Image (tube, helix red, strand yellow):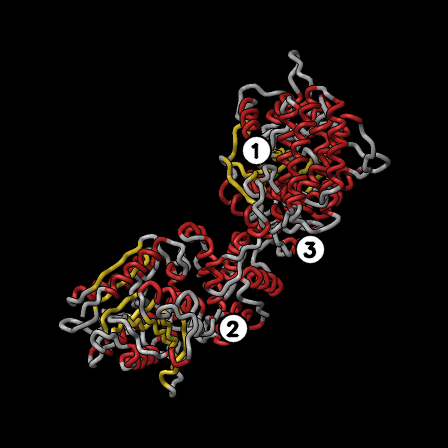
């Protein structure tokens, strides 16, 4: 689903069988040629990675459907092949704490990309987008009345559209967000953020990519060090760390002593979430003979954390790991007398002299001051993310992931000032910012690129792509990068803060 | 990943052919992969199931009608004959099938389909369509030979079948041109068919039968040596060297290597063509075909032997370019073929 919708050609053209292929005995719709070609490539890759005797055996044993319908024939072979072969990748280094192979469902589902959109639906979609833009514009101008009536109009339009996928679904969330901005919150879904985060982790590869890439970089930075300390700016359920612990356990020469400091919000009720996660990770570390120590640092905001809380020792190799946290610091009120939150935090990070700082951020520009700009950017970005989610068939992960994203959307659209924490900025801006505050980039290396791509093929549907961007990696959906992973080191300086 | 396999890079081939052609040829490549067994046997049943076949049609379609004829009952050798309708006929009776040609000069193209000696048949849709096109373009009768295939029938079966068909065609009085009461025969073949054309022409040398010209489209030749083009293009444009090797192993007599004269006619075990009246040849070579060095070597071999050869080198063409008409190579080659068979002055 694209924001720019081209006018669709007449229905009869969509059904057209390629005439030249028909002349030689094959039935393929012209509109499906690309998809069929893609599937042929996939099947070729599968065959290339199998032994010839396996292929011959498989060819004899499997049921072949009508060979003149190339698309169908290839599809069936692909799904047959998937059932009879396990993927020949060694992922002993990637095994996760709790998750098992139910992720295989992602690999070869019935993925007929052809969405037949009727003309009526297309017209509604175009109208809807137009109204969304106009609504955002009127909000920016302060014309609340117009905005309100537009919202009503859009909600009306939605009743005649498919809101389970595509533009209908995403538009729904944005209309909702606009509504909240004007009229305030109504129904709040009471699900803990860390739970939603976990489902988001399961539903699509963005977080897995982030963890995987960061871990690779951290692992390399820790080479040759016997005492290492990872500082995680947002522990959540600690999903990133089992893989690192396992990788360290398998390190030639033996594992180092690993300390993990997890930062997270204070828990409600009597629980201590941070400690619970720490205990689980300690269990895992013990089971693979890695000496491990955990410390939880509870803080509502990252700028409330003081470096002394982290208890970094000078003998340790330190890795600072920030998964989608730095942008939250950009909303502090500018004060000419005091350094901003981001400057403060980056400052004390530097003072820790970390071997590496891994930074993962949404690859989007949602920090523009102008509401209209922000709104448009967000609409494009989240449309793409939701598009990619379509490829996830697993519930409740998908539904929960959508709620997770909805919260982000709401924050971007509804909030202003310090309340707006989802202030995503693209890699190019982070490079500038980090460069100015005394960090220099570390190249993630072609190995990381290859491994990330491989991970993708394992866990995700067609459409995701890893790209290299001046030593950093991005993961995107089709040609749109959505998340960027980079690594940094502090430039040595003569002044150091005491901590 | 499986060690010795070439990494696939579909992007190369996708950039040089139209998408529907890419799908067509890749589909063949895929299917063929399923049919070749590592022990040298061939899954013939599955091959026949997957092959898109069309029946002959004595009702003219676009001015061409076809019918099948058994040429040799012992080996069940079939040919499919394609004829242009004459005048305004839109209905052909059984008596009309072998009605004598009325033209002063009518070229008869004896056609050998490709398939690396193992795949396809005279009634394969791709070849039925190609033969029909040739009828229109050349104003000719096309006789497509359903020769026996490897690995069930190795060398020299295909050549023998070709020779039988050639003899048969030369003795059909209804195919004789009015001008000289002779059948004006040209031989055309693609891939393994091109190879067959050469060897059948050799057989005809020691006979009364006159072949006016050979047309070889991406003919299949090879040898023990690994040529530069084979190394450079291995796996890049639909074909891998190891696939080629498999087909030679399936066709050549057991124990023979690729320097056998069937595979390498101008190689160490080849036959010299000096001083011999060999038909003039049109050799079409695709620049992205990995066996082009062998094909170019063939053309050179003819040239060195003092034979009349025209080489058409299509830099950006891949194998199978002539199967669909939506590329410039197709029109170019068809024009050349038309000129080649209409140049007939004898």
> Mark 2 sits on what residue?
B49
Instruction: Decide which of tag 1 and tag 3 comes sooner along the chain.
Output: 3
> Mark 1 sits on what residue?
A355
Estimate how packed mark 3 is, as few (under 14), some (14 to 19) or many (20 or more) residues with alpha carbons within 10 Å. few
Is circle 1 on the same chain as circle 3?
yes
Corner quadrant of residue A60:
bottom right
Q: What is the residue that sits farthest to the right in this orientation?
A: A269
- State the SS at label 1: loop
In the image, taking residue A491 as reference, residue B142 lies left or right, namely left
Task: Identify the residue at horizontal 30%, vertical 79% (top origin).
Answer: B174
- Whole-percent x and y of residue B157? 34, 80
* Chain of residue at mark 2: B
Q: What is the residue that sits farthest to the bottom in this orientation?
A: B74
Estimate how packed mark 2 is, as few (under 14), some (14 to 19) or many (20 or more) residues with alpha carbons within 10 Å. few
> Mark 3 sits on what residue?
A102
Task: Identify the residue at horizontal 72%, vertical 36% (top origin).
Answer: A173
* Quadrant of the image containing the C terminus of chain A: top right
Estimate how packed mark 1 is, as few (under 14), some (14 to 19) or many (20 or more) residues with alpha carbons within 10 Å. some
* Distance CA(mark 1)–CA(mark 2): 62 Å
């Amino acid at each position: 689903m694209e924001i720019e919708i081209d006018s669709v050609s007449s229905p009869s053209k969509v059904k057209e069988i390629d005439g030249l292929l028909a002349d030689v005995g094959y039935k393929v719709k012209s509109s499906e040629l690309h998809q069929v070609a893609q599937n042929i490539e996939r099947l070729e890759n599968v065959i290339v990675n199998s032994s010839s005797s396996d292929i011959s055996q498989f060819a004899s044993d499997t049921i072949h459907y009508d060979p003149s319908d190339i698309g169908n024939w290839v599809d069936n072979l692909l799904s047959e092949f998937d059932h009879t072969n396990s993927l020949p990748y060694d992922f002993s280094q990637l095994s996760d704490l709790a998750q098992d192979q139910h992720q295989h469902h992602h690999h070869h589902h019935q993925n007929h990309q052809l969405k037949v959109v009727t003309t009526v639906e297309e017209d509604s979609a175009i109208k809807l987008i137009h109204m969304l833009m106009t609504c955002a514009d009127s909000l920016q101008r302060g014309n609340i009345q117009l905005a309100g009536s537009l919202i009503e109009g859009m909600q009306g339009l939605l009743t005649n559209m498919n809101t389970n996928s595509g533009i209908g679904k995403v538009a729904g969330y944005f209309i909702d967000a606009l509504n909240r901005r004007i009229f305030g919150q109504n129904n709040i879904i009471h699900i803990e953020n860390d739970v939603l985060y976990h489902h988001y982790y399961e539903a699509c590869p963005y977080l897995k990519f982030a963890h995987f890439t960061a871990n690779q970089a951290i692992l390399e930075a820790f080479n040759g060090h016997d005492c290492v300390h990872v500082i995680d700016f947002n522990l959540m359920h600690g999903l990133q760390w089992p893989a690192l612990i396992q990788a360290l356990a398998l390190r030639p020469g033996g594992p180092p002593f690993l300390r993990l400091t997890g930062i997270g919000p204070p828990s409600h009720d009597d629980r201590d979430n941070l400690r619970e996660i720490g205990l689980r990770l300690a269990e895992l570390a013990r089971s693979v003979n890695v000496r491990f120590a955990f410390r939880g640092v509870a803080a509502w905001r990252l700028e409330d954390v003081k470096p002394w809380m982290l208890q970094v020792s000078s003998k340790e190799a330190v890795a600072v790991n920030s998964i989608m946290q730095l942008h939250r610091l950009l909303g502090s009120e500018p004060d000419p007398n005091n350094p901003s939150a981001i400057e403060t935090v980056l400052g004390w990070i530097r003072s820790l002299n970390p071997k590496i700082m891994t930074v993962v951020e949404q690859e989007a520009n949602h920090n523009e001051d102008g509401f209209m700009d922000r709104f448009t950017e967000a609409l494009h970005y989240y449309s793409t993310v939701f598009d990619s989610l379509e490829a996830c068939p697993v519930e409740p992960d998908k539904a929960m992931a959508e709620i997770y994203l909805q919260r982000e959307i709401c924050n971007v659209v509804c909030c202003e000032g310090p309340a707006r924490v989802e202030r995503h900025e693209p890699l190019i801006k982070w490079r500038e910012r980090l460069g100015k505050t005394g960090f220099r980039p570390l190249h993630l290396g072609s190995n990381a690129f290859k491994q990330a791509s491989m991970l993708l093929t394992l866990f995700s549907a067609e459409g995701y792509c890893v790209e290299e961007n001046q030593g950093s990696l991005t993961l995107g959906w089709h040609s749109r990068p959505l998340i960027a992973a980079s690594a940094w080191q502090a430039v040595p300086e003569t002044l150091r803060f005491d901590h | 990943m499986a060690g010795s396999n070439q990494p696939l890079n579909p992007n190369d081939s996708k950039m040089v052919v139209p998408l529907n052609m890419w799908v067509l040829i890749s589909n063949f490549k895929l299917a063929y992969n399923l049919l070749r067994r590592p022990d040298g046997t061939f899954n013939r049943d599955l091959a026949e199931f997957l092959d898109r076949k069309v029946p002959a049609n004595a009702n003219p379609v676009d001015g061409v009608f076809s019918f099948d004829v058994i040429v040799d009952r012992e080996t069940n050798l079939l040919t499919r004959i394609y004829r242009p309708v004459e005048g305004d006929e839109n209905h052909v009776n059984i008596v009309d099938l072998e009605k004598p040609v009325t033209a002063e000069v009518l070229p008869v193209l004896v056609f050998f389909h490709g398939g690396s000696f193992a795949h396809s048949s005279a009634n394969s849709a791709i070849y039925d369509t190609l033969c029909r096109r040739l009828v229109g373009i050349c104003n000719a009768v096309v006789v497509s030979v359903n020769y026996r295939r490897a690995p069930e029938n190795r060398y020299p079966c295909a050549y023998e079948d070709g020779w039988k068909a050639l003899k048969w065609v030369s003795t059909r009085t209804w195919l004789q041109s009015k001008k000289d009461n002779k059948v004006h025969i040209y031989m055309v073949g693609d891939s393994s068919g091109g190879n067959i054309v050469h060897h059948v022409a050799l057989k005809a040398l020691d006979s009364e039968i006159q072949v006016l010209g050979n047309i070889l489209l991406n003919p299949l030749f090879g040898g023990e040596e690994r040529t530069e083009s084979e190394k450079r293009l291995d796996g890049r444009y639909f074909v891998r060297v190891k696939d080629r090797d498999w087909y030679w192993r399936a066709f050549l007599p057991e124990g023979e290597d690729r320097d056998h004269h069937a595979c390498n006619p101008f190689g160490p075990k080849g036959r010299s063509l000096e001083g011999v009246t060999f038909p003039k040849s049109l050799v079409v070579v695709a620049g992205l075909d990995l066996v082009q060095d062998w094909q170019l070597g063939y053309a050179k071999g003819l040239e060195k032997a003092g034979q009349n050869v025209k080489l058409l080198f299509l830099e950006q063409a891949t194998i199978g370019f002539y199967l669909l008409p939506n590329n410039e190579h197709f029109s170019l080659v068809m024009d050349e073929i038309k000129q080649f068979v209409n140049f007939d002055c004898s």
